[in-house]
Image (cartoon, helix red, strand yellow):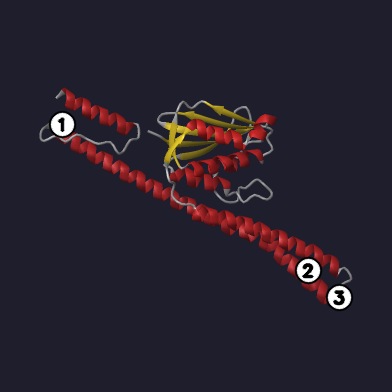
């Protein structure tokens, strides 16, 4: 009986730590059999709930992306329409400055089309993003790759790499997680803060990726709705970077959150489950 109880307690502890694939020993009869059946049923229901939640989060990410695309495509259409009207009016009136109007208007139209093209390229990248192919990745090698990628910035003192993780390996899709980190660093650098910090650490059977900056921080609107449309703070930004990061985090079974640092600046924290 003592061994049966120990087995049930060990299984319960693994479930509490997030392991929903925990195998249970079979018991033929008695109280331990009923307890094992109840625990097994609970694990199944938890796993199904987790799968439904993940599916709901994926749908929400698609809905946000759709709203962003609809909003952002409307923006370039207004100047394109105005430029077309100016060209028609200048031509029909035979104005002397028609050539200058033609040059200015066509330049504006080309710039706005290029902007829409960049936006649609991001959308296509989002739509084509496959489910993650998780493999065992050496943490030291992964860190070395990041160090090489940002060698110039690190040497210039505009970026710091802080490694507190004690893990030897991670079960992740390395290319997708690298894309997530690149997107977060790009967003942080574009805020105008002098230094960007990439922080890698461990917490409660998770691997934590943190990116912080010393810029102005997130607005109250951005903090309240970090993945919603209409909140891109960059003049030429689409606001899609965080949505792509959200998609990658969700597909890895993880979470992503934004915050303002007490000492100033913004931060984004991604938590990825690891056994």
The disc placed on residue 32 is 1
Quadrant of image for the N terminus: top left
Q: Is residue 137 above or below residue 51?
A: above
Q: Is residue 23 visible?
A: yes
Quadrant of image for the C terminus: top left
Q: Is residue 214 visible?
A: no
Provide residue 81's location: percent of width, then percent of height: 70, 66
Point out the tag, 2 or 3, that comes first from the N-terminus.
2
Q: Residues within 10 Å of mark 1 (few under 14, many from 20)?
A: some
Q: Residue at x 13, y 31 (%)?
A: 31
In the image, taking residue 1 as reference, residue 58 lies left or right, namely: right
Answer whether labels 3 and 1 touch (C-beta < 8 Å): no
The disc placed on residue 86 is 2
Where residue 75 sits, quadrant-wise, is bottom right
Where residue 25 sits, quadrant-wise, is top left
Mark 3 lies on residue: 94
């Amino acid at each position: 009986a003592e061994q049966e109880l120990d087995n049930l307690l060990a299984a319960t502890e693994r479930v509490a730590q997030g392991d929903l694939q925990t195998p249970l020993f079979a018991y033929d009869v008695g109280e331990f059999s009923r307890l094992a059946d109840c625990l097994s049923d609970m694990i199944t229901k938890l796993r199904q709930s987790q799968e439904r939640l993940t599916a709901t989060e994926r749908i929400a990410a698609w809905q946000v992306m759709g709203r962003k695309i609809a909003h952002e495509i409307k923006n370039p259409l207004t100047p394109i329409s105005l430029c077309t009207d100016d060209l028609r009016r200048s031509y029909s009136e035979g104005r002397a400055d028609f050539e200058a109007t033609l040059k200015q208007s066509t330049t504006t139209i080309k710039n706005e089309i290029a902007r829409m093209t960049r936006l649609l390229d991001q959308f296509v990248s989002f739509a084509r993003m496959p489910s993650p192919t998780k493999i065992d990745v050496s943490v030291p090698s992964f860190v070395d790759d990041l160090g090489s990628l940002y060698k110039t910035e690190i040497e210039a003192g505009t970026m710091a790499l802080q490694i507190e993780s004690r893990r030897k390996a991670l079960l992740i899709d390395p290319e997708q997680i690298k894309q997530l980190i690149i997107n977060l660093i790009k967003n942080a650098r574009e805020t105008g803060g002098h230094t960007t910090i990439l922080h890698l650490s461990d917490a409660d059977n998770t691997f934590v990726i943190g990116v912080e900056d010393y810029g102005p921080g997130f607005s109250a609107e951005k903090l309240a709705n970090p993945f919603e449309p209409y909140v891109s703070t960059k003049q030429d930004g689409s606001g899609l970077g965080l949505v792509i990061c959200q998609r990658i985090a969700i597909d890895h079974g993880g979470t992503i959150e934004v915050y303002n640092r007490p000492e100033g600046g913004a931060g984004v924290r991604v938590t990825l489950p690891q056994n």
